[in-house]
Amino acid sequence: MSESSNSAGSMLPRHVAVVMDGNGRWANKRHLPRAAGHKAGVNATRKIVENCAKKGIEALTIFAFSSENWSRPKAEVSSLMSLFVTTITAEVKKLNKKNVRVCFIGDRTRFSAKLQESIVESERLTSGNTGLQLNIAANYGGRWDIVNACRQLVAAVEDGSVALEDIDEQLFDSSVCLSEIPAPDLFVRTGGEQRISNFLLWQLAYSELYFVDTLWPDFSDEDFEASLDWYASRQRRFGKTGQQLIDDHAVESN
């Protein structure tokens, strides 16, 4: 996983990560069951996927279901699981036609056999696509990701394939989810909350964090454009000073 080095206003983010928050509150405001909010959220998800694909953004990672979401009411969890199956089945062929590659991250072993089959089939069908990579984080948690990476490295040390002294940030980075693509440049969270909520804890180290009050089902193309405009105004330093970035840009231009 590499960090993008684009300076202010020079390009779109290569990788966008989104916490799609506010489905339940959207439904409550309309005196609807929470499940209706999740269904409405699918439409917003479809729009941002299409938008990213059209703009040539390389990767979009969405937080569909966290490892903590199992603690929600059983009826809501059951509804979400059913929605996953129907949405994957309904959308994957359309995504395939648009050259979108679908990947899932997280511990899928807790899902039903039917949902696991849908996940595997969606990944298989789109594996050869070269457009937008849509990463769906399901039963995922950033702490789980880091612990899982640690377990992999411990096992590698025990079997002799990795020496303890060779473990560094780069090797650890290769053991977490999404290591094969650039780290997220832009993190977007809807719904007004200003926290990461155990999402991509390692990967978001240098991401620009954008928070918006809009509830996810209401998140429009204009809202996404606003987040991209905000991102373009940022100066990504990665530990350097602003003057160093200006000097680096001058050298690259010559």
Image (cartoon, grey):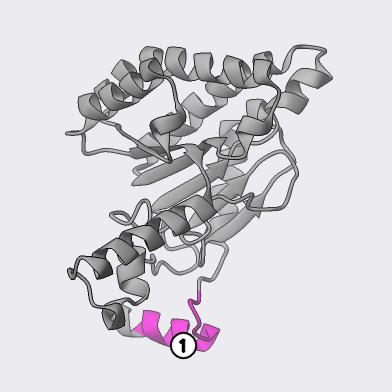
**Image spot of residue 63 (x, y percent):** 53, 39
Taking depth in this image into account, of 164 and 108 the one nearest to the observer is 164
In the image, what residue occupies the spot 17% across and 68% down? 161
Question: Could you say which quadrant of the image residue 215 lies in?
Answer: top right
Above or below 212: residue 121: above
**Image spot of residue 241 (x, y percent):** 53, 86
Above or below 109: residue 254: below
In the image, what residue occupies the spot 63% across and 52% down? 196
Number of numbered tags placed on the structure image: 1
In the image, what residue occupies the spot 45% across and 43% down? 61
Extent of the magenta region: 237-250
43 to the left or right of 59: right
**Image spot of residue 49 (x, y percent):** 43, 32
Mark 1 residue crowding within 10 angstroms, few (<14) / some (14–19) / many (20+): few
What residue type is disc 1 on?
A: Gln
In the image, what residue occupies the spot 53% across and 47% down? 141
Is residue 235 found inside the magenta-colored segment of the image?
Answer: no
Is residue 248 found inside the magenta-colored segment of the image?
Answer: yes
Quadrant holding the N terminus: bottom left
Single out the residue that lies furthest toward the front.
158
Residue where numbered disc 1 is placed: 244
**Image spot of residue 200 (x, y percent):** 50, 53
Taking depth in this image into account, of 203 and 221 the one nearest to the observer is 203
Above or below 33: residue 65: below
60 to the left or right of 131: right
